[in-house]
DNA sequence: TTCTAAACGAGACGGTACGTCCCGTCTTGTG
DNA sequence: CACAAGACGGGACGTACCGTCTCGTTTAGAA
C-alpha cells in the first residue's frame, strides 16, 4: 500500500485529517467513473473531496498512484462461502464475478487493471496478487468437490478462472456496447449457461 | 467510419496525400503501443508519420477519433476456414483469438475497445458490428457441425463467444501481469483445454 | 512597383484577369481598414475579392507586399494648385492634409507608413519618395510667395512640412481617441489656426 | 490599469512573483522593438523574461493586453520644469518631445498608440488621459508666460500641442525613412526652428 | 481545329503561434 | 506540522493563418 497503512506518525504538528484518505479515494473513483481517464483531474478530485491539492500530493506521488490506490482500496476480494455442492459453489462465484463487471465501479477497476497491466509498476504487482487469490478460491472449490467425491479429474484452475472471468467480462462488455442495462434475469441465465458448460466440460 | 471510406472526393483542389491515412494510423498505433494513452501525443504521431499536425486534424476531429480509427482500420476480422470437424474449427478459431490478444498490437486494440466501450460513439458502433461478426462465425461453426451430425444440442452462441474470447483475454492478461512472453506451446495447451471444456460442456 | 506596371506579358497562355489587381487591392484595403493588421488575412482578402489565394500570390510575394501595394496604389499625391496668395496656398494644402488623416483610408495609410517606416523594405522607399514630393510642394508654395514679394525669409521647408503634417495627424489622433467624428467646421478652424501660426512664425 | 495597481491581494496562496510584471513588460517592449508586431510572440516574451507562458496569461488576457500594458507601464509623462522664460519652457518641452520620438522605445510606444488608437479600449483611455496631461503642461507654460507679462494673446493649447508633437513625430519619421541616426545638433536646430515659429506665430 | 501554356479556383500541406488546460512543484498564510 | 490557496514552469491540446504545393478547369495564341 502506498500510504494508508503507515502508522499514525506520532509526533508534533497538526495531525492529518482523519477520514481524508477515504474521502479522497472515494471522490477519485467517482471522478474516474464519471469522466474516464481523460477528464480525471487532480484539481477535480481535490475540489470534489473538499481538500486542497497539496493534501493529495502529501499522500500520493502522482495521479497514477492515487487512481491505483483508489482501485486497490475499494477492490473487494470476491469472497467465497461453501454452499455444499460444486455446482452451488461455482454458481455463487460466477454470479459474483458477473456482477462485479456489470457494476460501473467494477468496470472502472477492470479498466485500470488493463491500463496498468503492461505499464507494470505498483498496480501490476497488486493485480498479480489479486489474481493469485482468485485462483486459490477456485482451487479451494475443486478441492472441496474432490473431498466430497463430486469430482475426480485433474483440473488446471487457471483455465477455469480464465473461462469464468472472461465470460463475465465479455458479457458486461456486450451490454456496454449496446448501452443496455444488465438485468438480473439475464445475468442469472448467462451464469447458468457458463457454469453448466464448465461443469460438463471438466468431467 | 470517420474518414477512410469516403469516396476519393472528386473535384477540385489538391488531392489528399495518398497513403497519408495509412501512415498516420500506423504511427498512431505504434505511439499508443509504446507510450500508452498518456504519452500518446498528436504532435508525436505527426512527427513520426512525417506529416504536419494540420494534416491530422483535417482528417480526424481530435485525438480520440484518430485513436479510435487506428483500431478500426487495423482490426482484422478473425477469418475462419472449414477444417472439416467441430473440434478442428473451434481449435482454429480459439488459436486465432489467443494469438490476437497475445500480440502487442492486438492487446493495444483491446485496450482501446475497453477505453472507448462506454464513452465513445463511433468505435462502440464498430465494435458492436465486429462482435456480431464473431458471433456469426461461431454460429457457422456449429451449423456445420449439426450438418455433419457431430452435434445436436441447442447452443447460445453468445455464451460460447464470451467463453472463448474471455479465456483468450485472461490468458494474455496473466502473461502480461507476470511479464512473461507467450510461448507457442503453452498457448496451444491452453487452447486445447478451453476447446475441450467447451466441446464437452455443450454436449 | 511590384506587379502592376509590368507590360501585359505578351505570349501564350490565359491572360491575367483584367481588373483583378484593382479588386484585390481594394478588398485588401477594406479588410485592413475594418480589422486592422491582425485580422487582415490573405484568405479573407481573397474571399472578399472573389479570387483564389493563388491569384494573390501570383502577383504579390507575401502579405506585406500586398498591403504595401494597396497603400501605394491608392495613395493620392496631395496635389496643389496656385491660389494666388501664400495664405491661400497654405490653407489649401493644410486642408487637404487634415482631411487625409481624418479619412479612415488615409488613417490606414498612415498606420502602414508607421509600421513599415523602420521595417524598411519596399514601402519605406516609396514613403521616402512621397515625402520628397510633399517637400517639393511646400518649396513651390514658398517660391511662388517669394516671386510675388509676399515673403522674403529663408525657409527650411522640412520644418514647415513637419509642422503642417504633424498638426494634421495629431488633430486626427485626438478625434480618434475620443471616438469623435471630424466635423468640417472644427477642421477648418484648426487649419486656420495652424496656417496663421506658421505664417506669422516664418516672417 | 490591467493588473499592476491591484492591491497586493492579501490572503493565502503563493504570492505572485515579485518583479515578474516588470520583467515581463520590459521583455515585451524589447521584443516588440526588435521584431515589430509580427514576430512579437508570447512564447518569445515568456522565454526572454524567464517565465512560463501561464504566468503571462495569469496577468494579461491576451497578446494585445500585454503589449498595451507594456506601453502604458513604461510611458513616462514628459515632465516639465519652470525655466523662467516662455522660450526656455517651450524649448525644454520640445526637446523632450523630439527626443522621445527619436528614441527607439519612444517610437515603439507611438506605434502602439497608433495601432490601438481606434481599435483598443484600454489603451485608448490611457492615451486620452496622457494627452490631457500634455495639454495641461502647455497651458501651464502659457499661464506662467502671461503671469510674467511675456505673452498676452489667447492661445488654443490643443493647436500648440499638435504642432509641437506633430513636428517631433515627423522629424523622427523622416530620420527613420532615411535610416539615419538622429544627431543631437540637428535635433537642437529643429527644436529651435519649431519653437521660433510657434513663438512668433502666437504673438 | 488542335495543341500548348499560363491563369485560375480549390484546397491539402508543413509549420508556427495562439490561448486553454492540466500536471506536479513551490511558496505563502492559517489552524 | 498539516492544510488551503493558488502561482509557477512545462507541455499538449485544438484552432487559425501563412506561404507552398498540386490538382482539374479555363482561356487564349500558336501550329
Image (tube, coloured by chain):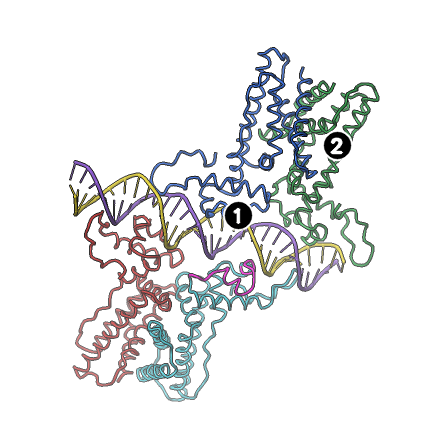
Chain colours: A green, B blue, C red, D cyan, E purple, F yellow
Q: Is residue B200 visible?
A: yes
Q: Nearer the viewer, residue B110 or D178?
A: B110
Residue farthest toward the top in the current orientation of the protein: B149
- Identified at 55% across, 43% down, the residue is B31
- Identify the element where label 1 is drawn: helix
Q: Which residues are magenta?
A: D38-56
**Rendering coords of residue B17 (x, y %):** 41, 42
- Identified at 80% across, 22% down, the residue is A145
Q: Quadrant of residue A127?
A: top right
**Rendering coords of residue E12 (x, y %):** 40, 43
Q: Callout 2: residue from which chain?
A: A
Residue bearing mark 2? A134
Q: Please tell me the numbered disc located at residue A104.
A: none
Residue farthest toward the front in the current orientation of the protein: B185
- Identify the element where label 2 is drawn: helix
* Above or below, C117 relative to A1: below
Residue bearing mark 1? B44
Dot 1 surroundings within 10 Å: few (below 14), some, or many (20 or more)? some
* Left or right of residue B187, residue C53 in this image: left
**Rendering coords of residue D203 (x, y %):** 31, 84
* Above or below, F19 relative to C152: above
Q: Nearer the viewer, residue C166 or A84?
A: A84
Disc 2 with disc 1 on a shared chain: no
Within the magenta stretch, is there residue A87?
Answer: no
Q: Quadrant of residue B184?
A: top right
* Above or below, B104 relative to C25: above
Camera-side mark, 2 or 1:
1
Amino acid at each position: 500500500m502506498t500510504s494508508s497503512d503507515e502508522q499514525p506518525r506520532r509526533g508534533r504538528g497538526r495531525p492529518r485529517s482523519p477520514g481524508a484518505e477515504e474521502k479522497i479515494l472515494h471522490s477519485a473513483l467517482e471522478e474516474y467513473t464519471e469522466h474516464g481517464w481523460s477528464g480525471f483531474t487532480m484539481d477535480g478530485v481535490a475540489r470534489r473531496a473538499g481538500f486542497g491539492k497539496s493534501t493529495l500530493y502529501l499522500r500520493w506521488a502522482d495521479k497514477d498512484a492515487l487512481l491505483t490506490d483508489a482501485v486497490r482500496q475499494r477492490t473487494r476480494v470476491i469472497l467465497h462461502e461453501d454452499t455444499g455442492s460444486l455446482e452451488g459453489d461455482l454458481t455463487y462465484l460466477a454470479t459474483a464475478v458477473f456482477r462485479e463487471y456489470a457494476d460501473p465501479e467494477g468496470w472502472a477497476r477492470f479498466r485500470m487493471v488493463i491500463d496498468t497491466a503492461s505499464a507494470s509498476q505498483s498496480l501490476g504487482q497488486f493485480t498479480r496478487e489479486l489474481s493469485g487469490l482468485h485462483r486459490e478460491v477456485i482451487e479451494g472449490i475443486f478441492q472441496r468437490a474432490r473431498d466430497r467425491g463430486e469430482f475426480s479429474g485433474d483440473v488446471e484452475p487457471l483455465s477455469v478462472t480464465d473461462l469464468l472471468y472472461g465470460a463475465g467480462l465479455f458479457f458486461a462488455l456486450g451490454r456496454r456496447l449496446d448501452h443496455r442495462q444488465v438485468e438480473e434475469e439475464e445475468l442469472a441465465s448467462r451464469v447458468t449457461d457458463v457454469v453448466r458448460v464448465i461443469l460438463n466440460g471438466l468431467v
